[in-house]
Image (spheres, rainbow, N blue to C red):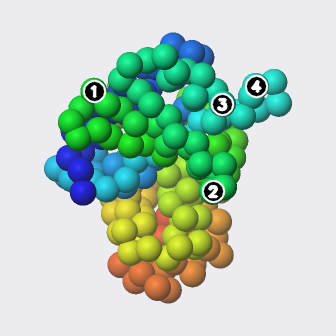
């Protein structure tokens, strides 16, 4: 577990670097629910980076943006197809995993799917739930379930149900009954 404030400091620094390079991005992970809950600790932070037809792969864009900056290093693992950037201005350093947009989160990142929290771009509530639900369906981790339940139960009225895979959420609710009332309220809101 890391302090949420440290993760946000690293996110602010990375966001500034990516913004200066013109790279659309948004943060995601349990840090999102920690910020919304004013929790002191969090255990994961990811940065979703947009690629596209006219741009290099998101990993290359990020590596190019942080190269030569003394506070940043990047580690690419081609065998696992992962990129991690490390913010070394803080002790201990903070590592952020880079995820390609479209594989996690929406393919294009813009004002319609980004929510600024403390000046840092995060996925909006609907996109966060969609991405977390996808992750939960793959790995079934309890911390992912906790994040989904927390955000859905408190912010269900901000969710665009068209962005949530209904079968996946129904399956999630059968395993996590505490999300049932918020999911039902959201379905009623949309006349389902």
Residue 129: horizontal and vertical position, in percent?
A: 50, 58
- For label 1, the residue is 89
Q: How far apart are the alpha carbons under marks 2 and 1?
A: 27 Å
Give the mark nearest the N terminus, 1 or 4: 4
Q: CA distance from mark 1 to mark 4?
A: 29 Å
Distance from the alpha carbon under mark 4 to that under mark 3: 9 Å
Which residue ends up furthest to the right in the rendered image? 53
Which residue appears at 53% of the width and 73% of the height?
A: 139
Dot placed on the residue nearer the N-terminal end, 2 or 4: 4
Residue identified by numbered label 2:
80
The residue under the point 42% across, 67% down is: 144
Estimate the spatial distance between the alpha carbons at disc 2 and disc 3, rounded to whole Å.
Answer: 16 Å
**Residue at (50, 34) in percent of width and height:** 74
Query: In the figure, 166 relative to 38: above or below?
Result: below
Would you call the spot at circle 4 few (<14 residues within 10 Å), some (14-19), or many (20 or more)? few
Q: Quadrant of residue 166?
A: bottom right
Label 3: few (<14), some (14–19) or many (≥20) C-alpha neighbours in 10 Å: few
23 over 181 or under it: above or below: above
State the residue in front, 29 or 75.
75
Location of the N terminus by quadrant is bottom left
Expressed as whole percent of the image width and height from the top left, the position of residue 191 reads: 60, 66
Question: Are circles 1 and 3 on residues that touch, CB within 8 Å?
Answer: no
Q: Which residue is mark 3?
A: 60
Q: Residue furthest bottom?
A: 174
Q: Nearer the viewer, mark 4 or mark 3?
A: 3
Q: Secondary structure at mark 4?
A: loop
Q: Is residue 105 visible?
A: no
């Amino acid at each position: 577990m890391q302090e949420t404030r440290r993760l946000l400091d690293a996110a602010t620094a990375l966001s500034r670097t990516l913004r200066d390079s013109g790279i659309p991005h948004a943060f995601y992970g349990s840090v999102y629910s920690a910020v919304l809950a004013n929790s002191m600790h969090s255990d994961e932070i990811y940065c979703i980076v947009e690629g596209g037809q006219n741009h290099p792969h998101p990993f290359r864009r990020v590596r190019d943006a942080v190269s030569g900056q003394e506070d940043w290093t990047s580690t690419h693992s081609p065998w696992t197809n992962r990129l991690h950037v490390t913010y070394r201005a803080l002790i201990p350093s903070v590592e952020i995993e880079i995820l390609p947009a479209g594989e996690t989160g929406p393919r294009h990142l813009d004002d319609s799917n980004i929510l600024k929290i403390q000046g840092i771009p995060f996925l909006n509530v609907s996109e966060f739930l969609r991405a977390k639900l996808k992750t939960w369906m793959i790995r079934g981790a309890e911390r992912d379930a906790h994040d989904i339940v927390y955000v859905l139960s408190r912010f269900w009225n901000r969710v665009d149900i068209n962005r949530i895979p209904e079968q996946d959420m129904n399956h999630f609710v059968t395993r996590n009954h505490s999300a049932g009332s918020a999911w039902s309220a959201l379905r009623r809101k949309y006349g389902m």
